[in-house]
């Protein structure tokens, strides 16, 4: 079914934000998403400014049988924030953040990015676990689980979620927390965008102000990865380090002879006391020969901006992801092998630690099922020329095939691409059937299906 001029007039009358269609001058800007691989042409984009706009958009999509995509920060690598010939609910004008410093909580609108959120909370010396790129949306990251620099100390983003407001497939606005609609609240914490449009999220905050953060670079070597594995095993929870395999960035802190050459790096955030900084640096020095380093005491929000310039909107991305209980020698060998053939300066592999406080939550307390995993492997190609798409996709798929024997069956839904629908059940393992039950209750017609979809 198509949207008629009359019905679009009705939609515009019901929406305070902008309703953009193909004949609008702003259409090409409105339809653009972070990952340039997804060049789609929706029939209509609704730039919502409040929950009322979201309700109107959802009801319009249902009435006219339009496929419905939801866009927050626009970072969905799988392109779920856009759709051909359908309706896109764009939340990017809903970015307000309100902090209660006494209660140590914050409530943010669904289109806020981690840059917005961190800026607001840092004014009070507070933070919660967020992503590692500031332009990432809080909604998508949290609904998938939410890994970041504070995860070992304070848990995943979804572990710090206190409440949410959700527009359901029936156009109803529901508030949920542990007491109100607790089944929906449970499902949101890791179950992705399967259950509705989340228009606001409330978080628990923690005292985090200035951190020791940055990147330490080493030659690409399995011994460095094994030493990092050992460091992570006995590091205090205040020390969060992400192991990265990449080509040497063209940055002043790295000697020019290493630019474009395979390296590995420890992307580190230490939220402990400054007098312990030297001990942290000594741990990093012990991983292998240091070939370059940028480390400093930084306001916490700054550490989430360190890769923003390297990863602007408009690049092409194709990713995969896996969990593992341990970082085995076999997995390290695969990462080193593919690190040697990293296809571009923008591409990388990142191994996130998800132990510490992440393991203090049971595997069935939230929808995030892999509480026995200690590492999350994210890898894939990122490129600038569409002519390189086939090569990058093939490289990523070969990498994934080689790594699978050394990892668990499932992986992190936010690192999955659009062709990973066959992994949805194993990604949610023991929680899948319960998630299906919640899906049947709140979205029995699978209106919200543009995601790592849990079919009702």
Image (spheres, grey):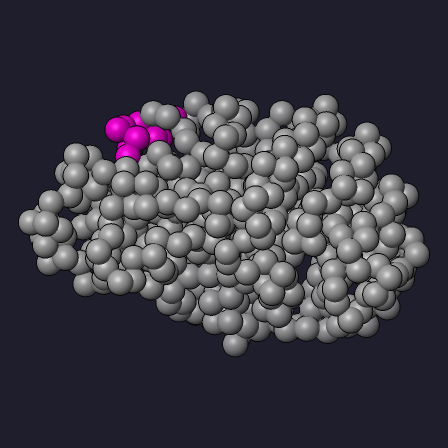
Seen in the image, is 134 located left or right of residue 174?
right
Name the spot of residue 360 as percent of width and height, x first: 62, 42
Q: Position of residue 20 (x, y in %)?
A: 24, 57
Q: Is residue 249 visible?
A: yes
Quarter in which the N terminus is drawn: top left
Q: Is residue 443 magenta?
A: yes
Depth check: give the residue in front, 431 or 360.
431
Instruction: Name the residue furthest front.
Output: 387
In the figure, is residue 162 to the left or right of 234? left
Q: Position of residue 317 (x, y in %)?
A: 56, 46
Residue 57 image offset from top left, x and y in percent: 21, 49
- Residue drawn at 37 percent across, 51 percent down: 71
Task: Classify residue 293 as left or right of residue 147.
Answer: right
- State whether residue 207 appears in this view: no
In the rendered view, would you say 55 is above or below 367?
A: below
Residue 131, located in which quarter of the rendered image? bottom right
Q: Extreme left residue here?
A: 6
The foreground one among 101 and 261 is 261
Task: Please give the name of the residue rendered at 63% of the width and 61% of the height, measured from the top-left corner.
Answer: 310
Q: Which residues are magenta?
A: 436-447
Name the residue at 93% across, 56% down: 289
Report if residue 273 lies within the magenta region. no
Q: Residue at position x 78%, y 33% from top?
A: 334
Q: Quadrant where the C terminus lies?
A: top left
Between 330 and 362, the one nearer to me in the picture: 330
């Amino acid at each position: 079914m198509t949207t008629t001029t009359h019905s679009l007039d009705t939609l515009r009358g019901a929406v305070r934000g902008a309703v953009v269609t193909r004949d609008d001058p702003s259409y090409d800007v409105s339809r653009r998403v972070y990952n340039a691989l997804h060049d789609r042409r929706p029939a209509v984009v609704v730039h919502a400014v409040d929950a009322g706009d979201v309700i109107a958009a959802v009801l319009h999509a249902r009435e006219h049988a339009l496929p419905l995509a939801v866009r927050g920060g626009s970072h969905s690598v799988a392109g779920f924030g856009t759709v051909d010939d359908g309706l896109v609910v764009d939340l990017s004008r809903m970015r307000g953040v309100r902090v209660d410093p006494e209660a140590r909580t914050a409530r943010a609108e669904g289109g806020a990015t981690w840059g917005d959120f961190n800026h607001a909370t840092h004014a009070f010396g507070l933070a919660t676990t967020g992503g590692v790129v500031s332009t990432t949306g809080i909604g998508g990251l949290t609904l998938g689980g939410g890994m970041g620099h504070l995860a070992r100390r304070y848990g995943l983003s979804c572990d710090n979620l206190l409440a949410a407001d959700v527009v359901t497939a029936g156009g109803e606005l529901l508030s949920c927390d542990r007491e109100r609609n607790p089944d929906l609240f449970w499902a949101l914490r890791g179950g992705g965008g399967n259950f509705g449009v989340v228009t606001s999220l409330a978080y628990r905050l923690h005292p985090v102000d200035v951190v020791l953060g940055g990147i330490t670079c080493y030659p690409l070597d399995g011994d460095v990865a094994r030493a990092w594995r050992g460091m992570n095993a006995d590091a205090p929870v205040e020390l969060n380090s992400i192991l990265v395999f990449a080509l040497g960035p063209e940055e002043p802190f790295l000697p020019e002879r290493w630019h474009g050459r395979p390296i590995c790096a420890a992307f580190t955030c230490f939220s402990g006391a400054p007098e312990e900084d030297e001990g942290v640096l000594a741990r990093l020095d012990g991983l292998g020969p240091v070939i370059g380093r940028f480390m400093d005491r930084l306001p916490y929000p700054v550490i989430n901006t360190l890769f923003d310039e390297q990863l602007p909107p408009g690049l092409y991305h194709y990713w995969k992801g896996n969990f593992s209980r341990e970082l085995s020698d076999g997995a390290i060998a695969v990462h080193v092998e593919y690190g040697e053939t990293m296809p571009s300066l923008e591409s990388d592999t990142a191994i996130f630690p998800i132990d510490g406080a992440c393991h203090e939550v049971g595997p069935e307390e939230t929808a995030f099922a892999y509480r026995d995993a200690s590492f999350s492997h994210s890898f894939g190609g990122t490129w600038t020329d569409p002519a390189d798409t086939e090569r990058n996709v093939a490289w990523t798929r070969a990498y994934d095939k080689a790594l699978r024997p050394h990892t668990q069956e499932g992986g992190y839904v936010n690192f999955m691409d659009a062709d990973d629908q066959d992994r949805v059940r194993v990604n949610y393992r023991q929680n899948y059937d319960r998630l299906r039950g919640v899906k049947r209750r709140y979205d029995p017609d699978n209106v919200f299906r543009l995601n790592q979809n849990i079919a009702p």
